[in-house]
Structure formats: C-alpha cells, structure tokens
Image: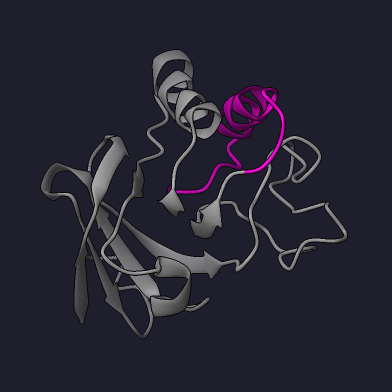
Amino acid sequence: MKVYKGRTVVGGGAVKGEALVSKMPFGFFGGVNPKTGIVIDEWHDLYGESIKDKILIYPEGRGSTVGAAIILELARCGCAPKAILFNDSEIITATGGILSEKFYSKEIPMMDRFACDVTRKIKTGDIVRVNPPEDTIEVMEGAIDEDE
C-alpha cells in the first residue's frame, strides 16, 4: 500500500473504490452523459468508460462552466464518481462537488496538490481509499473488501 498526502478541495468522509485514470484533462460538459455516467467524448482516452462509483483521476479540468451542473446532475441520477483526484483542481469541478452535497446529500470528495503526479502513480483498476479528513489517499491493488 502507498500513501500520498494531498490537499482536500471538497471534503466528506473516507471512501474506497476502483480507480479510473486518465492522462488527459477532463471536462464534464460534453464529456459525460449525466444520466448514465458514461464518458461520451469520443476524443477522450476514457471514451465509453463509466465514471459511476469510481475514483476518477485526471490531471486537470477542462471546459465549460456548465460542468458544475453536469456533476450535480450525475449526483441526482446516482451516476457520480465516489471521489475525484487531480493534480490541479479548478473551481467549476469543486463547485459541482459542493452543490452535490448541498442539494442531494451526495458527497464527492475531491483532492489535489499531491507531491507526485497521481495520474502516473495510480493505474486504472487500483483500489484507492480517499480520506479527506486526513488529506491522504491510500493506493492498493486487488479487490475491494466490502466489509471494510
């Protein structure tokens, strides 16, 4: 297990899930179908993948101010990621996470500013525990133990 310290952008309780990692900037508006959680941007390396209940990891945000509304709709539809990790956060994504908790009681913890590039240290399929109260993430391999 590897532990990385970062900065909590949007808080919440600790969550654990499977990583879905992109090497490309990610934009929610035009990038993901909020009713399914499927990435619909055919030029993106996550095209066709579901972000639902994943630990979504990408280098930085891209795109429209409507992205916050898309994150809010993902939360309403039950298709949001469990958490979002990035190297550099941006206000639109953070706003979507804050509003998701406010309107739908759906926490989407978000963290950034790790000492390393998380898109290079974590791979798709790794199990990641995001712990906003401690500003840490734990990266492990293997299946999720639902009893934890």
Task: Residue 120: name its quadrant.
Answer: bottom left
Question: x, y percentage for residue 118?
Answer: 40, 68
Q: Is residue 17 left or right of residue 93?
A: left
Q: Residue at x 62, y 34 (%)?
A: 74
Quadrant, the N terminus = bottom left
- State the extent of the magenta-drawn residues as a range: 62-85
Report how many numbered discs are placed on residues in the image.
0
Q: Is residue 113 left or right of residue 69?
A: left
Quadrant, the C terminus = bottom left
Question: x, y percentage for residue 5?
Answer: 19, 60
96 in relation to 85, above or below: above
The answer to which of 122 and 112 lies nearer the viewer is: 112
The answer to which of 35 and 3 lies nearer the viewer is: 3
Task: Residue 66: name its quadrant.
Answer: top right
The answer to which of 67 and 146 lies nearer the viewer is: 67
4 in relation to 39, above or below: below
Q: Residue at x 48, y 70 (%)?
A: 119
Q: Residue furthest top?
A: 103
Taking the magenta stretch, the answer to whether it contains residue 140 is no
Query: Is residue 26 something one can see in this rendering?
Result: yes
